[in-house]
Image (cartoon, rainbow, N blue to C red):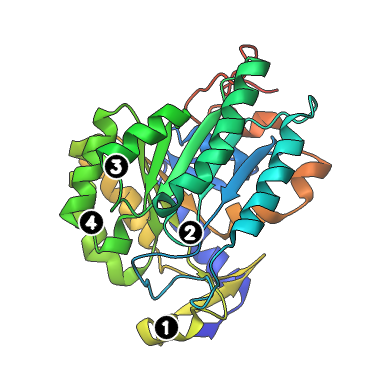
Amino acid sequence: MKLVNYQEIIAEKIKRQKSIPQLEYHAAGHAVHIGKISPGCRGCLSPEPSIGIQIGTQCMFRCPYCYYDPKRPKHTLEQINFWLAEFRRKTVNPNWRPNIFSFQSSGETLMYLDQLERFAKLIKEMEKERGGNFYLYVYTNGVLADSKNLERLKNWGVREIRFHTAASNFSEQVYKNIERAIEYGFTATVELPSLPHYRDKVFEMLPIINSLGVKHLNLLECQVTIHNVNALHQLYPNGRMHQGYFIHLYDEGLVYDIIEEVIVKGYNFSVLDCNSGVENCRHGEGRYVFFNMDSIKGMCDEWDYYGKTKLDCPI
């Protein structure tokens, strides 16, 4: 792989975007999508308070593009207890009013439900006390999304489950679990990296997830770290990387190939180009200096947090 000038990649992206008139642009142009995206995405694209609760490091898969340290140690009970105490301290502060909570892991989230449930109980108590209607969602590769675990997530108040279908190589089991999650009333999102070696599998997936009733498809530009750079180089010896807030591997236009396919076939789910620009929004400080809420008006499915604030309106 080689690191190329940022302008080279951005110029190619802009040219491709201009060829698709159906695209929508929000969050100062960083959210490029078709259809209304998930309310959970507001946490990355606006200054509204959102919290990611990340517990656990182990996973049943070893994806070559995983950007975490493969030798990452397990979280200890002492660590989790400390994080829980800090979280509890925040929940009793009446001025702390996050809208969005995500449950995630640097491994497989559903392997750590016992630990995460301790946080979920505090969120539920805070929601009840404040009369809120928080948006909770979970990341998973989907293998463990069986009836027992889905029922548990439902009791927590989780609204959306994001499935990383590529981790299991697009297994039938995961598709069945997506179907089951939708039957339980969850919003189902598929979220995976836009890597060219998955191209055929992703195109095969599109009619499947459409028939299941998946509501959102988020395609991530793959982040390159010291932990996955060698594996990615083996997959893409001629790959092009570009540097923004992080270094990302360019997907050579795959995101927009997929978007065009979704448009032509008339599929019913939204598609988000979750690219390096989104990383700039998520991690940068600019949105706390100035942010025009009109820039995300109409971007997401509507969600009412506190009975007064509508997602579809400026705050």
Measured Cα–Cα span from mark 3 to mark 4:
13 Å
Residue type at mark 1 is: Ala
Packing grade of label 1 (10 A; few <14, some 14-19, many >=20) is some
Above or below residue 163? Residue 63 is: below
Disc number placed over residue 15 in the picture, else none: 2
Quarter occupied by residue 178: top left
Residue type at mark 3 is: Ile
Q: Label 3 near label 1: C-beta < 8 Å?
A: no
Pick whichever of labels 3 and 2 is earlier in the sequence: 2
Disc number placed over residue 263 in the picture, else none: 3
Packing grade of label 4 (10 A; few <14, some 14-19, many >=20) is some
Packing grade of label 3 (10 A; few <14, some 14-19, many >=20) is some
Side of 38 where 217 appears, left or right? left
Disc number placed over residue 231 in the picture, else none: 1
| Residue lying farthest to the right in this orientation | 289
Residue type at mark 2 is: Lys
Give the residue at mark 4: 203
Q: Residue at x 34, y 66 (%)?
A: 60
